[in-house]
Image (spheres, rainbow, N blue to C red):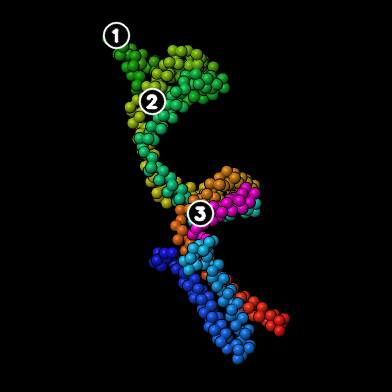
Amino acid sequence: MARTPTALLSPADQERRRGLRTMKTIALGALLALAALFVVAFVLQERMPWLGYVRAATEGGMVGALADWFAVTALFRRPLGLPIPHTAIIPTRKDEIGRTLGEFVETNFLSGPAVRTKLESTPLAARLGGWLTRPAAAERVTAEAATLASGVLRALSDADVQDVLETLTREHLLTPPWGPPAGAWLEHVLDAGAHRGAVDLAVDSLAAWLRANRVAFEGLVSRRLPPWVPRVAHRFVDETVYREAIAFVEAVQADPGHPARGAVDGYLTRLAERLQHDPAMIDRVEDAKTSLFDSPRVRELAARAWEGAKTGLLAALADPGSGLRRRAAAAVAEVGERLRTEPTLQRRVDGWVTDAAVVTVDRYRHDIASIITDTVERWDAAETTEKIELMVGRDLQYIRLNGTVVGALAGVAIYAIANLVLR
């Protein structure tokens, strides 16, 4: 089986490979030492009977060492390259091992009760809140969110955004008729008397304009008089018209029941009625609406508004000192403080997270576990074997040493019992 070049291994795997080689050398050295002792004991036991115990110990130790060497080696490759059945278990049954591992994880870990028990014993909201209250954490969350938002904004095509906005506008704003809803709204305003404040404002504004623009009345009426009328009469007419206008506006201001107010109320009432029930008025409103939104000027203004908003957002998101970023960080820290100090909110958030996790696990447990199965199936058999051997091979070499020691003790025990019983 080809070995991965050391240069391609991670530093941790390189260290594991060195440890594995060391343990293999020790285990092999123990076997060779027992073999040498066996030869000495076998040759000299006739002259020194006590060497029979040494021979029995070395025989048992070699048998244990060889048996455990075979068992350990058979996990990863075929011992001595021989096609012995049930050897090279990991490379030949890699896919089955992956499926078994996936089923084990799905059955024992990705279950609703197991997830709920773990999450209910963990104060998720309190821990999250404690972390978010740290200034560095709040800034980090804000920075990550700003990066994500900037990426989304840059990925959006201006033409596509405008098309989507136009489609939504036409679907939800232009397609429904405006006349009847506007008429119903105006009728509610009139019934509640909420329009009176607007009328007062209009009258006050008109009065202020009249007082500040007396010159505008010079010649307003007199220029329409016959040429033979004296100039004094011209000035008298203009002043009379101006005074009457001031007096009329002041009378409207002072009298809540002034006929002019009644006329306005009547006009608005008729307008509300026509907006709701007059087909001609409804069509006029629809035509005006369509003309307004289909105007190239309006389209140009909408495009410029989007471009300006996008540019401003990108600049604010990219600047850590911008008002948007500072307010976002403050909001994150405030949320963290509430999560850290409010038990009611903690229980609510913990419940949401737990329920969501349980539903997700119950619904997608097989898909999640299949990640393990699919990943193992894609692995190369030789590479997989080496990775597993590097992870557990060093400990398996201790099994070889333990087998050597246990075999030696068993050999001595069997030899001693045989001598004791049979002689």
Kind of residue at badge 1: Pro
Quadrant assignment, res 214: top left
Front tag of 2 and 1 = 2
Instruction: Give SS at disc 3.
Output: helix
Q: In this view, does 193 lie to the left or right of 178?
A: right
Residue that extends furthest to the left in the rendered view of this protein: 227
Res. 95 mark: 3
> 128 or 316, which lies in front?
128
Sequence-wise, which precedes: disc 3 or disc 2? Answer: 3
The boundaries of the magenta stretch are 89-116
- Does the stretch in magenta take in 110? yes
Q: Indicate which label's residue lies in the foreground, 3 or 1.
A: 3
Residue 316 covered by magenta stretch: no
The answer to whether residue 18 is seen in the rendering is yes
Identify the image quadrant of the C terminus: bottom right
The residue lying toward the viewer, choosing from 69 and 121, is: 69
Q: Is mark 2 on a helix, strand or loop?
A: helix
Q: Do the residues labelled 3 and 2 touch (CB within 8 Å)?
A: no
Mark 2 vs 1, N-terminal side: 1
Q: Residues within 10 Å of mark 2 (few under 14, many from 20)?
A: some
In the image, what residue occupies the spot 41% across and 29% down? 167
Mark 1 lies on a secondary structure that is: loop
Residue 254 image position (x, y, % from top left): 51, 21
The residue at 34%/22% (across/down) is 215
- Identify residue for label 1: 226
